[in-house]
Image (cartoon, helix red, strand yellow):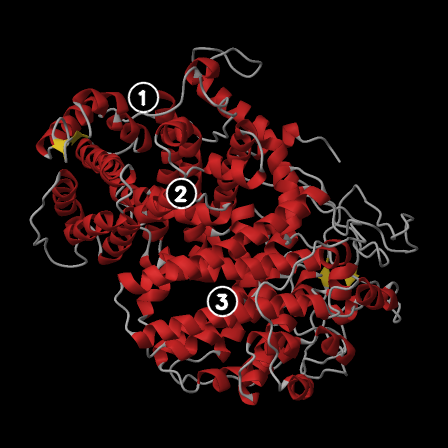
Amino acid sequence: MQPFVLPEFYLPHPARLNPHLAGARAHCKQWAYQMDMIDVPQHGTVIWTERDLDAHDYALLCAYTHPDAGAAELDLVTDWYVWVFYFDDHFLELFKRTGDIEQARGYLDRIGRFMPATGEITEIPGNPVERGLADLWNRTVPQRSAGWRRRFRESTRNLLDESLWELANINEGRVSNPVEYIEMRRKVGGAPWSANLIEHSVHAEVPDEIAAMRPMEVLRDCFADAVHLRNDLFSYQREVEDEGELSNGVLVFEKFLGCGTQEAADAVNDLLTSRLHQFEHTALTEVPALFDEHAVDPAGRTETFAYVKGLQDWQSGGHEWHLRSSRYMNEGALDARDVPSPFSEPTGLGTSAARIFSSMLATAPQRARSFAHQPYERVGPIDLPEIPIPFPLRLNPGLAEARENLVGWCRRTGIIDDLVWDEQRMRGIDLPLCAAGIHPDASAEQLDLTSGWLAWGTYGDDYYPVVFGATRDLPAAKAMTERLKLFLPTRGESVPAAENPLEAGLADLWPRTTGSMDAEGREAFRRTVEVMLESWLWELANQAQNRIPDPIDYVEMRRRTFGADLTMALNRITQAETVPPDLHRTRVIQAIEHSAADFGGLVNDIFSYRKEIEYEGEVHNAVLVVRAFLDVDQDRAFGIVTDLLHARLAEFRHATEIGLPGLCTDHNLDEAARSTLTTYVEDLRNWIAGVVNWHRECVRYTDAELDRLAEPFATASSGAPVIGMSAVLGSSGPGLPVDAASSLGSPLAATSAIGTSAASLIPAAVTAAPHASASPGVTLPAAAPWTAAPHISAAPDVTLPTAASPVTATSPSGTPPASSATPVTLPTGPTGLGTTALRIHTPAP
């Protein structure tokens, strides 16, 4: 009996079958015999019989997932999949069933010798896995570029090596948390490896200059997550009930949510659907802009689109194969799909399209929830969950002096500008308190430096929504971001004169931080600043579309928006001489850093929920993301986020107490390196304790402070309308009349409120903040130069788009505020793949 009913899957593309299927079936069987994979015992155990191979039908998988490949390419790709599935079963029988992790490590080390980064294979294969890899490597990599070979080698290595993570969890009886599971499944599950083979099979490589950029990484990760989650649903019975496997998404959700198997399976399918929606969103809105930004030539664009199409084909074809393969739980799935419905007939032309339409209707409410949030929703007051400080808190004795030093620094750089931040606000935020907890042993100079970076980053996080969020001037925000990068020289490049507080602050902090670094160190640190800057643009784009992010994309981008990479990089600066750089890319160090960063970000989301949702009209908060994704109420969402926070902390403890000693042993680190890593972990414990203490002690998130900031700007003293609470608070600063907001240093002429076609993507009614007078539907006047801050220039007129159906803002008491401004509803409905069905399904507001 099946443990749950398979859910309704989102299937936006029809599956197609390669005409060379029969040839691939015959070829792969012959090849498997040649590699001794069939009927040849391994340590006394036959891994596969010919009947097993036939029933699994990997040629059918490849014919569905690579429908346009030629006969020779299909044969090669099918051999690769025969090899990878044989490896999975070989590893299961030899090591997962025995728990012999030391033998498994030696086995995996040997396999790595059959995929050299350069040159030829020199090792003699000793088993079918090694023999198959040697043959396939020689048939594949000589035809590809160095960039592709590097990416493919890394994904293959991850697929092999991270099997140890699964084995370790089995030995410990440990089920991972959802975030850890998704990250690790990408490596051990093999979908990034499959993405590389798609490039090979369609003879189209993603240009190297964009392969590592966020949009391409998101496409790859969304593809991987969807492939793995789909596999988890079909393989639950085999893996969990038959093999004792603990690495399955349905099991992970069961344990984390404390729910039944059917509910967990439905939640996994919802996440699968969300990842496919994210894939579509990225392909349609981010990839074209990436081409333009990097001046990708027509050939490169064509090859990239061929790759994207290949990823889509794999999703559709992989689903069809799972419905048919004997390897998986699929009893009755094909029969159920062919039951007549109002949208399909059991046979005949058009049934594939009908099934696509039906799946879009079934998943449309989930997509609609991502765009349906009403900004400035009244959510408080809130009794926050208790979050104890998990590690001993020590505060730097230089805290009092650092507080005064930071006030002076913020005055000199213009950060205390009485518009985004005034001095009272800046003192109340008390960023030196955070710095004192993060770096309790720092010198006075180092403490000032950390305080400066925290102030600069927090001010920037507030500045962007105030200046660019209010008018949705995304091109201007992009221009400012590119200009800020000019203040991050790595090889002695000249730096322009600073023209606003962010530039002035960065011009001061950068040389003080990187003066003793070599060029390579400066490049690495520059990247941490760049990813934070670019994450602010990501937030602005979502805000312009009123789009609640996909949960996985949110968690991964939250590390950047929170600035965790940057502050952790300050700790790494002292490690360069004793810790090999490659060590920071290992699973254990990544788990330590990511779990700490996620803990900090989730702490912030819990404390800032009311500020962001009710006062700022934000969509970037984990509690809101969980509410929309799982369609649960606020209290339940708070409980889930709190549970995830504790789960990420538990992973941090596990990685530092169990994973790190094993890493030191595996890499034969000397005492100096071990001591440095021990110190680094202690620094991260200080970081966690300092972050929690700061959230508990500063006034930034208190109701009294939020009300203090909101009240003076309920109506602007100048008579100008106020642009919601994004202008009142940004992420924390005092409010701005429209004319002041339009003059806050926009480096580009704002040609429209959205900048480009993003206006057509905004799906929900955007109204004035409930704490202020209604303000949309206005023409922003050109502002006179701001006398209080002469370093900021005026911006030209900007007209907000208007629409026919107004939505009136309400005050906290529920009554419409007095205002002569005409309310406006921005255009509704997302665009792109599947949105016709969405618009049909979604009722009019």
Residue 543 vs residue 742, the one in the foreground: 543
Instruction: Identify the secondary structure beneath mark 1.
Output: loop
Q: Which residue is mark 2?
A: 224
- 774 vs 728: above or below: above
Q: Is residue 388 above or below residue 783?
A: above
Q: Quadrant of residue 676?
A: bottom left
Residue 645 is left or right of residue 141, and the answer is right
- The answer to whether residue 760 is seen in the rendering is no
Kindly identify the residue that appears in the image at 17 percent across and 22 percent down: 50
Asked if marks 2 and 1 touch (Cβ < 8 Å), the reply is no
Q: Residue under circle 3?
A: 565
The three-letter code of the residue at mark 1 reads: Ser
Q: CA distance from mark 3 to mark 1?
A: 45 Å
What residue is pinned by disc 1?
326
Q: Which quadrant holds the C terminus?
A: top right
Which amino acid, by three-letter code, is at mark 3? Answer: Asp
Task: Tell me, yes or no, whether the two marked residues, 2 and 3, touch with CB atoms within 8 Å.
Answer: no
